[in-house]
Image (spheres, rainbow, N blue to C red):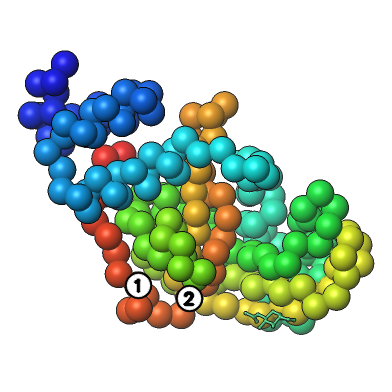
């Protein structure tokens, strides 16, 4: 079994098929740098974590985030209307922020394979799009529960920062939350390691 480790990068690919405990043991023996181990652990956490609130499923994420309508993204009522139409809420309470994106679900899902970068709040487990994406940023200005939620809408074009997670029943890695749309990619340093193992 331990001879697997000699066969990098094939061994890393095989590691991904194992259970978390087996992985923990294997990591101790794998010839990885400290930095590689850290990012590999980030990756594992993303794959296996279960938070207190359930993140949206693939279908819910799609219907809440992807823009299908032809409505202009610069419309000042965009968020207030679309958040109602698309049923965006957190157990019927108004969400504080939301992003609508003009792209395909598949493009966003691909971004999950990009390197880890820092999110806007300093948490490091975000992924960033490689191309500019258009969208609308919604910021709650009034209201507490659904249908009373009023938002400020801002058109944004930039690099999308988002978190991803593993959805077990469909066996796919999917976008979880959009963290930000940033205008420049200069400030963010990528941390190479797991690129290319999918
Ligand atoms: C969102 O709104 C809050 C309060 O209404 C404001 O303090 C904050 O700066 C806004 N955020 C952005 C990114 O516009």
Are circles 2 and 1 on residues that touch, CB within 8 Å? yes
Quadrant containing the C terminus in the rendered view? top left
- Compare residues 111 and 5 and report the one nearer the observer: 5
Residue name at image x 35 percent, y 72 percent = 188
| Residue that appears at 81% across and 62% down | 94
The local secondary structure at tag 1 comes to loop
Quadrant of image for the N terminus: top left
User: Disc count in the image?
Assistant: 2
Secondary element type, mark 2: strand
How packed is label 1: few (under 14 Cα within 10 Å), some, or many (20 or more)?
few
In the picture as drawn, the residue positioned furthest to the top comes out as 1
Q: Going 45% across and 43% down the picture, which residue do you hit?
A: 46
Q: Report, in whole angstroms, how far the alpha carbon at label 2 lies from the one at label 1.
A: 10 Å
Tag 1 residue: 188
Give the residue at x 49% y 70%. Answer: 120
Disc nearer the start of the sequence (2/1): 2
Can residue 161 be seen at all in this image of the molecule?
A: yes
Q: Which residue is mark 2?
A: 182
Give how far across and how far down residue 93 sits, in percent.
Answer: 83, 57
Mark 2 Cα within 10 Å, few/some/many (few <14, many 20+)? some
| Mark in the foreground, 2 or 1 | 1
Horizontal side, residue 179 vs residue 31: left or right: right
Residue in the foreground of this view, choosing between 73 and 19: 19
């Amino acid at each position: 079994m331990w001879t697997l480790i000699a066969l990098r990068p094939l061994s890393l690919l095989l590691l991904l098929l194992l259970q978390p405990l087996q992985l923990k043991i294997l990591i101790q023996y794998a010839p990885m740098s400290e930095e590689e181990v850290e990012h590999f652990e980030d990756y594992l956490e993303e794959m296996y974590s279960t938070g207190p609130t359930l993140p949206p499923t693939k279908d819910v994420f799609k219907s809440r985030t992807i823009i299908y309508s032809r409505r202009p993204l610069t419309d000042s009522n965009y968020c207030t209307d679309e958040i109602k139409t698309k049923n965006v809420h957190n157990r019927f309470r108004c969400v504080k922020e939301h992003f609508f994106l003009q792209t395909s679900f598949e493009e966003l899902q691909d971004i999950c394979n990009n390197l880890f970068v820092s999110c806007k709040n300093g948490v490091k487990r975000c992924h960033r799009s490689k191309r500019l994406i258009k969208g609308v940023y919604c910021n709650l200005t009034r209201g507490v529960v659904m249908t009373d939620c009023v938002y400020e809408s801002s058109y944004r074009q930039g690099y999308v920062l988002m978190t991803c997670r593993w959805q077990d029943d469909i066996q796919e890695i999917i976008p979880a939350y959009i963290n930000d749309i940033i205008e420049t990619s200069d400030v963010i340093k990528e941390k190479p390691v797991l690129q290319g193992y999918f």
